[in-house]
Amino acid sequence: MFTRRSLAALASAAIISLASALPALANPVVIKFSHVVAPDTPKGKGALKFKELAEQYTNGAVLVEVYPNSQLYKDKEELEALQLGAVQMLAPSLAKFGPLGVQQFELFDLPYLMSNYDDLRKITDGEVGQHLLGLLDSKGIKGLAYWDNGFKLMSANSPIASPDDFLGLKMRIQSSKIIEGQMLALDAVPQVLPFSEVYQALQTGVVDGTENPPSNMFTQKMHEVQKHATLTNHGYLGYAVIVNKGFWDALDPEIRTHIDRAMDESTTYANSIAREENEWAMAEMVKTGATKFHELSDEERAEWIERLRPLHEKMSSRIGADLVKQAHSVLGIQ
């Protein structure tokens, strides 16, 4: 009699056997995977894991070339490059889809929408998340998966424990109307800048501060040029792994099946290390002593929520009132 474990092992062996049966092509299918962060971030490591698995499962019929740190394209250029077919795969932050005309993705930018990773999975793995990925089809883009980075902190060169501390501060943001509205609600001055330019902008005083998960802050060495940070966990930074739809649809179905498997497994891997990477980055930054970190008390957190959560209703007409209502219902927000 076969146990569930033995059946799973047999199924896995069969898939690997099928992959090995694929001929190694003289001219393999090349997937250029471009992203804007460092290789040692959760997204960077996820991209390298996908490369490893896709090439393994297709027996070399697919070659994945990973280009980190904006080597090919900066924030504002990469989506257009994907649509034109200059690259085949990206993992842009979810805020990037608003300027593309799919502003429903700005749901993820709403401050204090999700409190933890359990809340996050209810959105990304549920109807809301899958509906959002489907909206990309009309833009010539196929959405494959959601990859985590983590929950964001605020940093600046002056103490920012309270929402009132942001008055007049120039804060770097991604191009997102929701994040712009968030900074305006704090009486700050939002400044849109490419991710690759943030360190220099902070160093030279072009901007006073920014928001990031700890792993981004550490790997880009922003802690070296930010004296203060507050662990607000006010928002989530994540990515959608996407592929040029024409390229995807033209792939041999068997190859596409193996790429899907590689993506599923690399997604599990990337998301499993995201929290660990952020915790490690946080500890390393604390060690340096360059930045003073402030952890919110319950009373302070309530003050932040009171200031920023009204943005949900204010921006619901942009995102879609029904979508915001559905997310609130899923997460139990009254």
Image: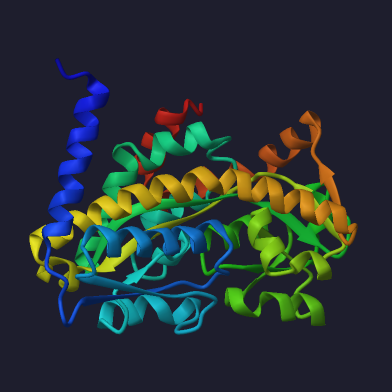
**What x and y, as percent, mark residue 65?**
37, 76
With 241 as the anchor, is 216 left or right in this view? right
Q: How many marks?
A: 0
**What x and y, as percent, mark residue 81?**
34, 82
Q: Is residue 106 above or below residue 226?
A: above
**What x and y, as percent, mark residue 43?**
50, 60
120 vs 61, nearest the viewer: 61
Query: In the image, what residue occupies the spot 33% across and 58% down?
Result: 53
Residue 197 is drawn in which quadrant?
bottom right
Query: In the image, what residue occupies the spot 12% across and 63% down?
Result: 22
Query: In the image, what residue occupies the spot 47% across and 51% down?
Result: 270
Q: How is the image coloured?
A: rainbow
**What x and y, as percent, mark residue 308?**
64, 45
42 vs 8, nearest the viewer: 8
With 319 as the anchor, is 257 left or right in this view? left
Q: Is residue 156 above or below residue 277?
A: below
135 vs 40, nearest the viewer: 40
Image quadrant holding the N terminus, namely top left
Q: Is residue 268 above or below residue 202?
A: above
Q: Residue furthest top?
A: 1
Query: In the image, what residue occupies the spot 23% across and 31% down?
Result: 8
Residue 39 is drawn in which quadrant?
bottom right
